[in-house]
Amino acid sequence: MRKKKILIIVFILIFALTGISVGHYFWKESKKMTGVEWFAEQESYVKQMETYTDSMDDIMTLYLNGTITKDDFLNHLSVKQDELTIMKGMYQKEKKAHPVRTGTHNYATKKGCESVEKCFQAFDDLISMAEKNADDKKALAYKYIAAHETLIDHLSDYMASYETVSEQLEEIKDE
């Protein structure tokens, strides 16, 4: 009789642990997004980048025109680096909280999402370049234009993807 009770308890524990494991798996799967849904989330980050770019342009223009000193310029760059770190942290946190289901990306959604990540890297490179070239305004101006072109390339990849995926995005917004 005692062996029978032990077997029943072991069976119940195994059954409960299996149920918990399966429930946890389905809970994790429910948090995942499709490639199109994740692409739709990129829009808020792109809008943040637009504001960030405008601010960087203002700072660069003020410095190149001699309106602010080198110390002020480097101070502003430090603040912009902190802002970028926060934006990237929020992006990574969201990316970790809502991973993309395997096999749900298509070429356009993957390319668009990658272009947003490339923009973050391009901003990092831009700030680093500006700090290194703060002493030579002429070199800074030319390198800034080149870095700006890189950003435009990445954003144009995003916009091309957006045009391709826009029909699928409308379906998500209607739901």
Image (cartoon, rainbow, N blue to C red):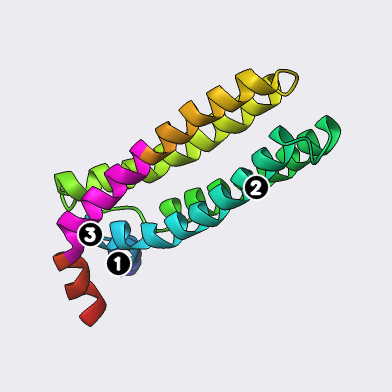
Q: What crowding class fits label 3: few (fewer than 14 Cα within 10 Å), some (14-19), or many (20 or more)? A: many
Magenta: main secondary structure equals helix
Q: In the rendered image of this protein, does residue 30 appear above or below residue 85?
A: below
Q: State the extent of the magenta-drawn residues as a range.
A: 153-166
Q: Which mark, residue 161?
A: none
Q: Position of residue 43 (x, y in %)?
A: 38, 60
Q: Which residue is mark 1?
A: 30
Q: What crowding class fits label 1: few (fewer than 14 Cα within 10 Å), some (14-19), or many (20 or more)? A: few
Q: Is residue 4 magenta?
A: no
Q: Which residue is mark 2?
A: 58
Amino acid on which the number 3 mark rests in the picture: Val
The residue at 28%/65% (across/down) is 26
Q: Looking at the image, tell me whether mark 1 or mark 2 is earlier in sequence order.
A: 1
Q: Position of residue 47 (x, y in %)?
A: 46, 59
Of 1 and 134, the residue lying toward us = 134
Which image quarter holds the C terminus?
bottom left
Circle 3 — which element?
A: helix
The residue at 27%/63% (across/down) is 37
Which image quarter holds the N terminus?
bottom left
Q: Which mark, residue 36?
A: 3
